[in-house]
Amino acid sequence: MLVDFFKISGKPKPHKTVTLVHHYKQNFMKIGIVCYPTFGGSGVLATELGKALAQKGHMVHFITYQQPVRLNGFIPNIFYHEVQVPTYPLFDYPPYETALASTMVDVIKNNKLDLLHVHYAIPHASAAYMAKQILKKEGYEIPVITTLHGTDITLVGRDKTYAPVVTFSINESDAITAVSENLRMETFKHFDIKKEIEVIVNFVDVSRFQRQPINAFKKVIAPNGERILLHASNFRKIKRVQDVVKIFAEVNKQIPSKLLFVGDGPERSTAEDLARELGVCDEIQFVGKQEQMEDIMPIADLFLLTSEYESFGLAALEAMAAGVPVVSTNAGGLSEIVTDGDNGYMGDVGDVATMSKHALAILKDDNTLNEFKKRAAEHAKKFDISKIIPLYEKLYERFL
């Protein structure tokens, strides 16, 4: 019932050089974006980037196996191309990478794309390399930009099964970007990368998140004015959602409060079991995957992110944009967002006691909470989409 409540709210080819010169003079480009269409940070960033580019007049072509979750409603200048993967009895595992590369070739040729921007190294960078080589044989040059997002480098990519291909395809990209300085350093540390990696940080549309909380939402979650704590993720092991439950249990002992879990994944059942064990199950609501986070974030008083590693922490940044302070671990790139003692607090991975103490310090009285909220909202403006999109445009234009 609560989930529904949230959802309610919410042929001959022209000469390539001629085509490129025309686009450059108009300052409009034809851009292919390859990403995962899911709720993860890489898919969210790629989709929001494409939407922002389209609003500025660029033609954006998304290439993926299903429509991205943030690509809702009609948006002029945006095109979606679904990757079809035929299944045959011969294949135990459908060859998605091959189908993706073939779809890239088709979309690039038929739509005269100027460049291809792939998000998440596996398997998008390697598929892009294959597509680029096929097109090169036909006399069509296409620049490929690869953006690294996190676990494609720090977890999956380091597996010896994938590492050689990941390294090769990243090095073959015309440009490489990372969403945080921490991720850039981790990539150089674990892979033999021969090219420079530019940092273009994740961004948030501040105007989208800075809105008054919908009182009806807040009343459903906290009917008696309780503090609302929030966590949003894909509930993978690396997110350590049990620590979120433990922190909430400590806060709830001293302050009337509710915990809202947004998202779903393999660790949800363990979080539910722990909530029952600690006696706080009735104070926690799991609302599943939600698209309209700008309606949900503003009702919260505190955002908890207890991950073992975050290359950046886009969910935390979205919370700040909504005026919600953050208590997080000091893992990965989170220190590039959270300023300890100013817009939130940080603790060591697994240090539930310290993070609980920090949460209580923020929530203890209205004046303190409001100061943290104000500073969080102000800090988020440094990462506003209006500041970051021009950096991508400038990068693209280098290859035109």
Image (cartoon, helix red, strand yellow):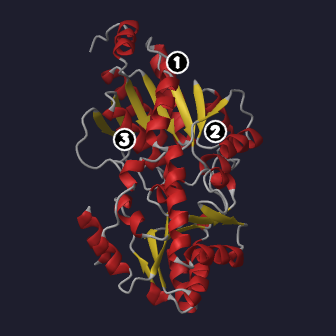
Q: Is residue 203 visible?
A: yes
Work out whether 381 lies above or below 133: below
| Local SS, label 3 | loop
Residue type at the position of mark 1: Arg
Q: Which quadrant of the structure image shows residue 82?
A: top left
Nearest to the observer: residue 354 or residue 271? 354
Give percent across and percent down for residue 387: 48, 36
Nearest to the observer: residue 286 or residue 10? 10
| Local SS, label 2 | helix
Label 3: how many Cα within 10 Å (few below 14, some 14–19, many 20+): some
Residue type at the position of mark 2: Val
Give percent across and percent down for residue 131: 47, 27
| Local SS, label 1 | loop
Distance between mark 1 and mark 2 Cα atoms: 24 Å
Work out whether 338 lies above or below 282: above
Pointer 1 residue: 398
Nearest to the observer: residue 340 or residue 84? 340
Work out whether 250 lies above or below 379: below
Pointer 3 residue: 83
Identify which residue is drawn at 52% across, 18% down.
398
Is tag 3's residue or tag 1's residue first in the polypeptide sequence?
3
Is tag 1's residue or tag 2's residue first in the polypeptide sequence?
2
Nearest to the observer: residue 355 or residue 163? 355
Pointer 2 residue: 166
Distance between mark 3 and mark 1 Cα atoms: 29 Å
Identify which residue is drawn at 39% across, 55% down.
209
